[in-house]
Amino acid sequence: MKILKIHIILSCLFIFSFLSCNQKKEQKVEHISSTQPEIMLDVLDLQTKNRLGKDTVVTITNDPVYRKEKKYKAVSASLLIKNEIDLSKIDPKNTKIVFECVDGYKPEMPLELFLKAKPYLAFQDSDAPKGTKWEIIVNDGNEMNADPFYIVYPSVSSKDARYKWPYNLVKIYLEPLNKSTLELYPLKNRKLESGYKLFKNHCLTCHAINGIGGTMGPELNYPKSVAEYWKEDELVKYIINPASFRNKVKMPTLGISKQQSREIVDYLKYMSENKKKI
C-alpha cells in the first residue's frame, strides 16, 4: 500500500513538473512574439501640421556622416515622441525604435537607449550653401542628401555603434523589441546564432530576408537566395570588401573578419532552406 502511494505521489510530481516546464516554454515564446502594439509616426506629415515642436540650433562636434563639426536647426526627438505617443501604454524596455529612410535604409535601436540620449531631429543644415537646406554628403565617391530629416545626438560619441544616425528620415516606428526574432533566428541550428547576430547587426538595416528588414539593398532570400547563385568563397570576400568587386558600390565596408563573413554566409545558407513567400 505504501509503495502504491509513493508511485502515485511520484506520478503527480512528474506531471506537475512536465506542465511547469511546458508553461515556461510557452511563456518564453510568448515573450519573444510580443503582442505590444506597433506605432508609426509620419515625420513629414507632422511637419506639415506644425507638430514637430520648438526648434533650436544644435552643434555636433564630430558628425559621423559629414565627418566634421556641424550645426543644425532641429527639434527634440524625444520630446516629439512623448508628445505624440502615450508612453504609459508601452514598455520602453521592451520596445525598439525603427527609422525608415527614403532610400530604404531601416536601422533600429532600443527605445529606452534612444530616449535617454536626448536626440534631436534635424530639419535643416545651418552650414549648407546659400539657397540650399543641406550640404551634400560625399561617401566613397557617392553624393547623397540628408533631406528631409536627420537624427543627431549632441552628447553621444559618433563611435558608439549602439546609436543610429539615419538621414533621409521620413517615418519612425515603435515595435516590440523582439519582433521578427522567431522568423529570422536559426531555431533548427543554434550553432549559427553568431552568424544571425552578425547579420542582424550589420546587414538587416539595408537587406531583407523573407521580406523582413531594410529595402536599400536587395532582398537576400526570396525567391532565390544570394547563397544559391553566388560562389561561396566569392560571397565571403564580397561581404568583407564590396568595393573590390564593384565600382562606386553603395554597400559599405563592414570592418568584419573573414571568419565573421563566413559565419554570415553560413547563416544565409541556412535561411535559403527556410524561405517564406513574401
Image (cartoon, grey):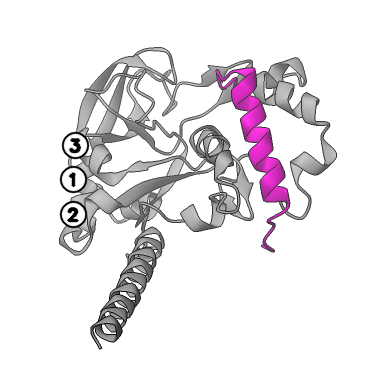
Q: Quadrant of the C terminus?
A: bottom right
Query: Are discs 2 and 1 less than 8 Å apart at CB?
Result: yes
Can residue 103 be seen here? The reply is no
Which of the two residues, 144 or 181, is positioned nearer the viewer here? 181
Residue at the disc numbered 1: 79
Residue at the disc numbered 3: 116
| Left or right: 102, with 123 as reference point | right
* Disc 2: CA contacts within 10 A as few (<14), some (14-19) or many (>=20): few
| Left or right: 189, with 120 as reference point | right
Farthest-out residue, top = 68
At label 3, the amino acid type is Lys
- With respect to residue 120, does 46 lie above or below? below
Q: Position of residue 92 (x, y in %)?
A: 23, 51
At label 2, the amino acid type is Asn
Q: Write down the region rendered in magenta.
A: 251-278
- CA gap between label 2 and label 1 equals 6 Å
- Determine if the magenta segment contains residue 264: yes
